[in-house]
Amino acid sequence: MSGPGTSRRLEGRVAFITGTGGGQGRAAAELFAREGATVWGCDLRAEGAQETVDRIVAAGGRAASLHPLDLTAEGGARRWIEEGVARFGRIDVLYNNASHAVMRRLGDADMWEAWQTTIRGELDLVFATIEAAWPHLVRQGGGSSIVNTSSTAALRGLPLPESGPGSSTGHSAAKAGLLGLTRQVAAEGASYGIRANAVLPGFIDAPVTSFILDQPGARERIGARLPLGRVGRPADVAFAALYFACDESAWVTGETLTVDGGAVSVAMPR
């Protein structure tokens, strides 16, 4: 069997990936490019997005990006989709990785504002890219894949594992909403040959979690609470997304894949 990066599972395809400025988005962009895809990315962080493009091109891959881009702004998602299709002629994979959440506890003075920002930044923006891409995906006549990033927060209520701003009803609700959105998109897309699936990451070492993991001993304490004994890496999620993006999952739609080191499904001894 070929090792990672040698099988070219996405040869000749165009993969649209949101949030490519670092973390899981960068890991997916680099992996998909190694697997043969042309990557069209975007991020609010222009420097990080350009660095991802430069890394892919330096490694012999094909990539471009629209940045800085705020997908929550009016027309932002449609602009990204339309410019990508105009540039590359098609869209074979839409990987909705980007998100923005404001974590607050119930009772916090600004909870309502945090809720609205999080729903827009984690649910609305995913719907916006799908809605903008839909006519192109239908017109292509099948073989396309939508991959949405949900979270284990969609499956259980849990405060953040280390000191921080607290758990968030908005985050949990948005990520659970993504599961319903994914299944409905799968149902409506089936007759067009459009698949939709979701990846549910657990605690991942990424820029968004750095404020937690930078605390002394945090990485070790969090890893010790997980059945597989370590914090997740962006590549762990990227490989799960690759499975949904490529033909190896051609008979899979409306499904979810939890990538969390066993946290949800495996009980740890007390």
Image (cartoon, rainbow, N blue to C red):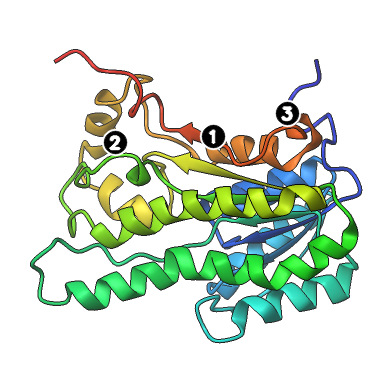
* Distance from the alpha carbon under mark 1 to that under mark 3: 12 Å
Given contact means CB atoms under 8 Å apart, are the residues at marks 2 and 1 in contact? Answer: no
Q: Nearer the viewer, mark 2 or mark 1?
A: 1
Residue matched to label 2: 219
Q: Against 226, is 117 above or below? A: below
Q: Against 122, is 120 above or below? A: below
Q: Residue 116 — which label?
A: none
Under mark 3, the amino acid is: Pro
Who's the residue at 35% across and 74% down the image?
A: 117
Residue matched to label 3: 4
Residue matched to label 1: 236
Residue nearest the viewer, comparing 240 with 127: 127
Q: Nearer the viewer, mark 3 or mark 2?
A: 3
Mark 2 surroundings: few (<14), some (14-19) or many (≥20) residues within 10 A = some
Q: Secondary structure at mark 2?
A: helix
Left/right of residue 41 with respect to residue 176 in the rendered view = right
Counting residues from the start of the chain, the first of labels 2 and 1 encountered is: 2
Residue 120 is situated, as x and y percent measured from the top left of the image, at 42, 72
Who's the residue at 81% across and 20% down the image?
A: 2
Under mark 2, the amino acid is: Arg
Left/right of residue 211 with respect to residue 130 in the rendered view = left
